[in-house]
Image: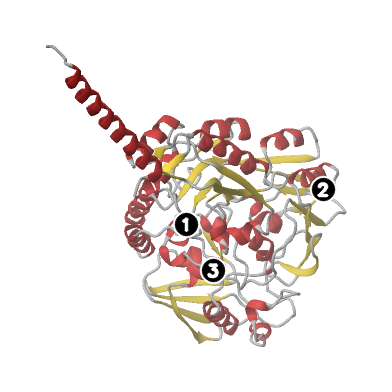
Amino acid sequence: MIITTKRLLLLSTGILVLLCGSIAVSKVMAAELKPIQEITLCTWTKTQYPIPYEESFMVAENWKKLGIQVRVEPLNLPNPALEVLFKNTDKFDAYIAIVLGQMERVDPDFFTFNTFHSSNVRPGGWNMAGFINKDFDRLAEMQRTEFDFVKRKAIVDQCQQLLYKENPWISLVNPNEFGAYNKADFKDPVIPKIGGFWDPFPYFTIKPTGERKVIRNARSGTDLKTANPLVASEGGQWMMLSPIYDPLLRIGPDIKPQFYAAESLNTIDQRTHDVTLRKGLKFHDGKPLTVADVKFSYDYMMKHNAPYFKTALDTVESVEILDNNKVRFHLKKPYATFVTQTLAMVPILPKHVWEKIENPTEYNNVPPIGSGPFKFEYWKKGQEFKLARFSDHFKPPYVDGLLVIFYGTNEAAVRGLIQKEADVILALVPEQLKELKKYDYIQTVQLPSPNADTMILNCKKKPFNDPKFRLAMTYTIPRKQMLDELYHGYGNLGASIIGPANVLWTDPSIKPRPFDLEQAKTILKEAGYRWDDKGRLCYPPE
């Protein structure tokens, strides 16, 4: 074919038009790209909790490889770290923390209803991720009312599978629990299978071997946040208060409920339960503990929405006094965790003290008065919290007292144990465990733990309000590297929100997702995310 000058001109013009059109489209596409804003990844300070701190930078490094700008913000415990988690949730996009698998959390209600039901998206509530899902709410409510273990387990498995799909929290690793104590001066602590020295039972049961009768607990925190049970909102703080109070039942070291202030329980039907109180109970001020105090405590905490106990109280309709030694619990509906939550968590308060308080949520409650194995002695803020043996308790401890020392950092707490300034330490890292084994007067303890290093994603904020974005982020977690380098392999890779140490309730079919940045990119691309010419990850065009 002969191409004339005129035809060449027309052809060139067409190519130019196409080229200009392509450039115009590219400019429009570029203009539509909106880079994801800088992500605030909160965690705890390196001096207090070095492992979550290191995990945060591992995650941040991988997010940066995806074109996401990240700022790691370490926060001091208890505040502002807990204020951000429980009250000012708009200040974080993601948050890496250690979630304790305490004894009262063995029941799956904590890791289902308490933590992810939409009703708990509130200040002080555990649904700090802001996760709202109608299907999950339905399942979480169903497991609460199912008394048959096999049927309830099937529902709890569905809850775990839905959370694994939606990822409001991402389980990083389930490390073993490490602790240590001074075996030269103390012996025979009954250490629970779950909770270890986080649980009060070791302090109730440990025995002095010589003249030293007060056991000293080294804490890496800086202080007790509150002495008021109506205000306490997190487990680590409540641990220090719980020895002061008696609940009706306690979860024992064997993970089974045992009678405590109550001596018996009679279930009339699934909504009606009679509790008989142990005789001869006294408060620390010498006043008798009666059924009136039991009724008052439950009524009072329900009235004032005590945050730590709210979900344990949600299904209680009323508490009725039947006689001088018996109360009847009327429930709004059947509640499968009535024994392990409602009866085993809620402390009995002295009515004669609290009924006089005009503003109970503003009351500092010093001295706190309970009926538990230990009674309050003093609190030097930022330094020490001292409890003394309550000899009139029906089962008093062997030691004369429990002294909590606030060291501020984990390293300082370990030095306190080595230098014999302290007797018990918890939340050790493997390097510290190895170091403490060198000393013949120190007994180290290692337990499989339901604790979880967890990344909480703020589902109320972009981009974490997108389930596909959250799914992509699950492939950015170098779990094996975290477990091997930070925990020396002691533990498990994170998968289900209920860890493998909780053998009754974990779903073993849920497996850890692999570390795979290419898979993360593929998920993002399929969801419409793009990268601009600077390599920044951008939202899908609207």
Q: CA distance from mark 2 to mark 3?
A: 36 Å
Rendered view: 438 above or below 223: above
- Give the mark nearer the N terminus: 2 vs 1: 1
- Report the residue that reaches farthest toward the right: 211
Q: CA distance from mark 2 to mark 1?
A: 35 Å
**503 on left or right of 22:** right
Query: Few, some or many C-alpha atoms within 10 Å of disc 1 (few <14, some 14-19, many ≥20)?
Result: many
For mark 1, give the secondary structure.
loop
Front in this rendered view, residue 76 or 523? 523
Residue 309's disc is 3
For mark 3, give the secondary structure.
helix
Residue, disc 1: 107
Please provide percent x and percent y for residue 523. 36, 37
Identify which amino acid the numbered label 2 is placed on: Asp
Q: Is residue 96 visible?
A: no
Identify which residue is drawn at 68% across, 58% down. Answer: 78
Identify which residue is drawn at 36% across, 64% down. Answer: 141
Q: Nearer the viewer, mark 2 or mark 3?
A: 3
Identify which amino acid the numbered label 3 is placed on: Phe
For mark 2, give the secondary structure.
loop
Q: CA distance from mark 1 to mark 3?
A: 14 Å
Q: Are marks 2 and 1 in contact (CB under 8 Å)?
A: no
- Give the mark nearer the N terminus: 2 vs 3: 2
Residue, disc 2: 185
Identify which residue is drawn at 80% across, 69% down. Answer: 377
- Report the residue that reaches farthest toward the left: 1
Q: Are marks 2 and 3 in contact (CB under 8 Å)?
A: no
